[in-house]
Amino acid sequence: MTGTLVVAGLLFEAFLLLVLILATMLEESRLRRFLEAATDPERAKEAAKKLGGPQRSIATELAESVRVRTTLDEALVKALVRAANEPWAPPVVLQAVLHILTVSVALLPLVLALVQTAEGVANGFGALAGRPGPARYLAGPRLLEGPFEALHAAAGGTAALLVGLAVVWAVGWWLRRPQVREARFVRALLELSTRIRPGTPALVGARLAELVAPERTLARPAAAVLVWVLATTVSWGILQLTAEVRAANHHPPRYHVWPEDRLNPLGVGADLVLPRQRGGVPFEDRALPTVTVGPAQLTVQGQALTPLGQGSAFPPPELRLPESFKGKGGVTIVGHAAVSASDAVIPTLRWLHARAGAEQFHLILQRDLGYATAQADLRLELPKEPPAQAGVTVQVNADELVVGPARLPSARSTWRREAAEAIRGLRHVDDRTRPDAPLLVRVGPGVSYERLVEALGALDDSCDTAEDCGLPGLGLRFVLSPAAPSP
């Protein structure tokens, strides 16, 4: 639709340009025929009747005066005076209609595109109404791309139409403005006098200059300079006001959507370093029991139970939980980045599941939002029974991540982006409000807790940029495989 309007507008402007050129050529041709018939008063009168606008009556009267042998100087001066007093411009109403029509043709594609973009934005908001926050940000750009691309194309088309309109107006000003038409006719009148009476001295110079010479003042140049200075100042001011916006367009987006009261809800000791990764959602339930897998010991609700790394199995079979520990509503896991996920964190989760019936685990990680650091929550489940609905299997190894059929070596620089694309392609998280099928997670040997959080965070990440954009994760369901960690 926009392309059709732009082509139609350009054809309309080409038609106007052709009309201006042909009208000027026709006017000059008729004046030339009038001059060629100057020596024959009857032919000159007939040629004068074929002229257009105010030229017809003035030239006809002059030819009649010459035919009845009126003094040529008096007839010519009278014609020049009438030419100076004639309104050579079209009627004001006609000028207004033409200007409104041409400007409307140039702006019509952009106006229609703005209306369509507004409708597209409104429809996009309606389509995103039922989605959770991260899914809105993922699907939003895709839904809004079409309307804004059409708007961009319409803006380019309107720019082309405005350039064409400027050309039409410039040619019209050059060929058809009142001063040019009057000067063209006055020149023809002066040439007519020399053709009728060759060798006749010209009119008195002062009187002729008074009638035909344009007024020469500095008013118009000064006004033009003033307009140029004003336009330059306004343009510079607009550029200054929009400098920050234009600079921000060159940087990856950062969204300030993380709740301020949930940036760092948990107190973490100085000797414990949380994994710094992406993904995860704001931590909500601070009342859940906390289990800390530190670099040297396991702590449950502030009570140190056993040093890590002692004995052949962890946790030791004789280890008991405090009687006040209630894990069925969920457990918060605060793990040191360097501890082993295969030998410490995952066995702790299975132990909590067996001893306290815990099925929901909240793995805490540290995120750098750009404007602040925040603790995020990756949710890992360990149900009593395997999920009824089969999901995608994720194998986390020390040197690679396997997502369904895709094997992504960690040495590959693009593995994060490929992991996000793979999981979205398998789960269609961009098009569904909340996928129900869980991701079955298996952890191989030799995997650190930081590596486990890094892999799960890459799958849950909702940012499409190299840096953390600040958006909460997708909130995917990660389910720890009931089977023992596979090699």
Image (spheres, grey):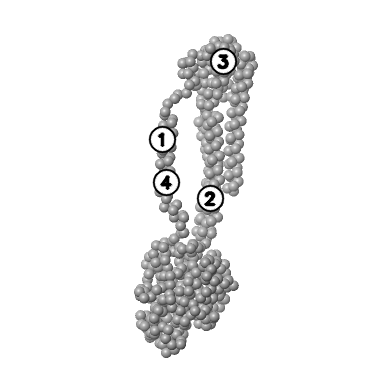
Q: Position of residue 129 (x, y in %)?
A: 49, 62
Q: Nearer the viewer, residue 165 or 346?
A: 346
Q: What kind of residue is marked 2?
A: His
Q: Position of residue 372 (x, y in %)?
A: 39, 64
Q: Are marks 3 and 4 in contact (CB under 8 Å)?
A: no
Q: What kind of residue is marked 4?
A: Ile
Q: Is residue 421 left or right of residue 324?
A: right
Q: CA distance from mark 3 to mark 1?
A: 43 Å
Q: CA distance from mark 4 to mark 1?
A: 18 Å
Identify which residue is drawn at 57% across, 15% down: 194
Q: What kind of residue is marked 1?
A: Leu
Q: Position of residue 135 (x, y in %)?
A: 50, 64
Q: Is residue 300 visible?
A: no
The 10 Å Cα crowd at callout 1, few under 14, some 14 to 19, many 20 or more, is few
Q: CA distance from mark 3 to mark 4?
A: 57 Å
Where residue 238 is drawn, which disc sits there?
4
Identify which residue is drawn at 58% across, 10% down: 69
The 10 Å Cα crowd at callout 2, few under 14, some 14 to 19, many 20 or more, is some
Find disc 3 in the rendering and name its residue.
Answer: 193
Mark 3 or mark 2: which comes first in sequence? 2
Image vertical order of residue 194 relative to residue 184, above or below: above
Q: Are marks 4 and 1 in contact (CB under 8 Å)?
A: no
Identify which residue is drawn at 48% across, 15% down: 205
Secondary structure under badge 1?
Answer: helix
Quadrant position of residue 355: bottom left
Identify which residue is drawn at 51% across, 52% down: 118
Image vertical order of residue 395 relative to residue 14, above or below: below
Q: Nearer the viewer, residue 385 or 460?
A: 460
Quadrant position of residue 315: bottom left
Find disc 2 in the rendering and name its residue.
Answer: 152
Q: Are marks 3 and 1 in contact (CB under 8 Å)?
A: no
